């Protein structure tokens, strides 16, 4: 144990942080052992391990907290399986005491961590479940968020999240064991669902809907961590996977500069590029090179290409806007959306001039999704300001402020209004 009893607060914070980080490892490993029919039991074991840690560590922390909590989960799992053998159906590998302890030991070992989480990720992205349910299951079982935290992230009540978890448990209960991803007949469909879910997870961390906490780097890091598990298996490795990982690397490299010291969003042109994570950008370039195999240019390739141009440019002025406009044009042909059109217009404004970008933005005014999107009105206001149309800019900034989803957004827009008074 450590010397001297730490405060209760520090113990609790350590346990909570460790629990979130290790939750995915422990739950997926135990479901691998207990079988999907016993998901609630696996969750109970992990919860009990947390409670045990909170009680045991009140007067001092172990030298290796992670090993302690894994050992606690192991012992609790062995006890419960022995007690429940007559009432529950477990996998054949747990028939004897020696096999039971050896199987759980192997499942909880660090060497098995990636494989169990990979199997869990592809199991929860079952085509019979909705994308919202996929996201909920990933956040719960692979990121360690509580139902309350997931509800707060997506602005829905906890009961809605509980219903999604219930549907997910019911669907997975039909499986005898977690799938071998190398043998899944619908691997392409599931991989697409996995990538889309991880993309949504990343976006929720990068600029989400939670008004109190619009930027949560740990969600971005979790999305990248889970994406980088996929190349470990031949069945789940794919150029699209590397393209998505590249996109996440380029964007996480800029995370530390997206908010200022007051928690207000900083526009791209004002971010301190010297603080961008160059090692992370290099990692993104490596993924992008690996994504170049094959002859398919996916949405993830195009978005990664756009993010790459921003990440490697020394300034907004030095950015290759011609390449970015080209990427957006192809992306619009593949999967047009109002937001893609908005970003294309902003890139056109940089390449061809403010007036060209303004015309494209004004043409999108009747799009229902954009009429409620604060960044559409902020983008229009920015171009009006640059064109010297300050009255129109103030009106558009006012709309952006009225639609802002968080104080971070609202204050950023208000600062731009203030800048009009001095320009």
Image (cartoon, helix red, strand yellow):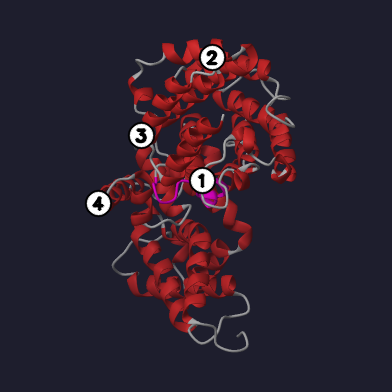
Task: Give the residue displayed 42% in from the left and 60% down from the top.
Answer: 34
- Mark 3 or 1, nearer chain start: 1
- The mark nearer the N terminus, 4 or 2, is 4
Looking at the image, residue 374 sits to the left or right of residue 322; the answer is left
Which of discs 4 and 1 lies nearer the camera? The answer is 1
**Separation of disc 4 and disc 3 at Cα?**
27 Å
**Cα separation between marks 3 and 1:** 16 Å
Report how far apart the C-alphas of labels 2 and 1 lie in the structure.
26 Å
Q: Tell me the SS state at disc 1.
A: loop
Q: CA distance from mark 4 to mark 2?
A: 44 Å
| Element carrying mark 2 | helix
Numbered circle sitting on residue 264: 1
Q: Indicate the position of residue 320 as horizontal and vertical percent values.
A: 70, 21
Whether 199 is among the magenta residues is no
Q: Earlier in the sequence, mark 4 or mark 1?
A: 4
Q: First in sequence, mark 2 or 1: give its number.
A: 1
The image shows residue 125 at horizontal and vertical percentages of 43, 40
Disc number at residue 403? 3
Magenta residues, as a range?
A: 210-221
Quarter holding residue 130: top left
- If the image is split into quadrants, where does the C terminus sit? top right
Residue 238 placed where, x, y %?
A: 61, 31
Instruction: Check if mark 4's residue and mark 2's residue have beta carbons within 8 Å.
Output: no
**Pointers 2 and 1 in contact (C-beta within 8 Å):** no
The residue sitting at the bottom extreme is 4
In this rendering, does residue 327 appear at all? no
Residue 17 visible, this orientation: yes
Circle on res. 159: 4
What residue is pinned by disc 2? Answer: 357
From what the image shows, is residue 186 above or below residue 148?
Answer: above
Residue at left offset 50%, top offset 20%:
384
Q: Earlier in the sequence, mark 4 or mark 3?
A: 4
């Amino acid at each position: 144990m450590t010397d001297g009893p730490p405060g209760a607060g520090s113990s609790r914070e350590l346990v909570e942080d460790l629990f979130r980080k290790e939750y995915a490892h422990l739950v997926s490993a135990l479901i691998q052992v207990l079988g999907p029919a016993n998901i609630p039991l696996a969750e109970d074991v992990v919860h009990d391990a947390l409670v045990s840690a909170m009680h045991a560590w009140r007067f001092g922390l172990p030298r290796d907290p992670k090993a302690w909590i894994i050992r606690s989960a192991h012992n609790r799992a062995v006890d419960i399986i022995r007690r429940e053998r007559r009432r529950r159906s477990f996998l054949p590998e747990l028939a004897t005491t020696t096999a039971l302890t050896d199987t759980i030991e192997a499942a909880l070992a660090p060497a098995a961590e990636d494989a169990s989480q990979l199997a869990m990720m592809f199991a929860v992205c079952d085509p019979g479940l909705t994308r919202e349910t996929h996201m909920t299951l990933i956040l719960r079982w692979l990121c360690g968020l509580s139902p309350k935290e997931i509800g707060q992230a997506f602005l829905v009540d906890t009961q809605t999240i509980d219903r999604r978890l219930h549907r997910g448990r019911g669907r997975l209960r039909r499986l005898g064991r977690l799938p071998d991803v190398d043998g899944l007949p619908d691997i392409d469909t599931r991989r697409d669902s996995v990538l889309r879910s991880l993309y949504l997870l990343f976006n929720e961390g990068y600029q989400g809907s939670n008004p109190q906490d619009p930027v949560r780097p740990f969600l971005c890091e979790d999305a990248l961590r889970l994406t980088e598990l996929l190349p470990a298996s031949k069945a789940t490795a794919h150029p699209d996977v590397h393209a998505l990982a590249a996109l996440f690397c380029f964007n996480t490299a800029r995370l530390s500069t997206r908010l200022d010291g007051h928690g207000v969003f900083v526009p791209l042109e004002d971010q301190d590029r010297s603080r961008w994570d160059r090692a992370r950008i290099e990692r993104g370039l490596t993924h992008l090179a690996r994504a170049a195999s094959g002859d398919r240019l996916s949405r993830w390739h195009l978005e990664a290409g756009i993010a790459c141009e921003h990440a490697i440019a020394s300034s907004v002025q030095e950015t290759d806007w011609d390449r970015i406009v080209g990427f957006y044009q192809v992306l619009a042909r593949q999967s047009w959306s109002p937001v893609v059109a908005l970003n294309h217009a902003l890139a056109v404004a940089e390449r061809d001039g403010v007036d060209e970008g303004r015309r494209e933005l004004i043409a999108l005014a009747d799009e229902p999704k954009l009429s409620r999107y604060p960044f559409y009105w902020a983008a229009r206001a920015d171009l009006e300001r640059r064109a010297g149309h300050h009255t129109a800019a103030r009106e558009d900034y006012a709309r952006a402020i009225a639609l802002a989803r968080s104080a971070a957004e609202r204050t950023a827009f208000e600062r731009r209004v203030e800048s009009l008074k001095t320009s």
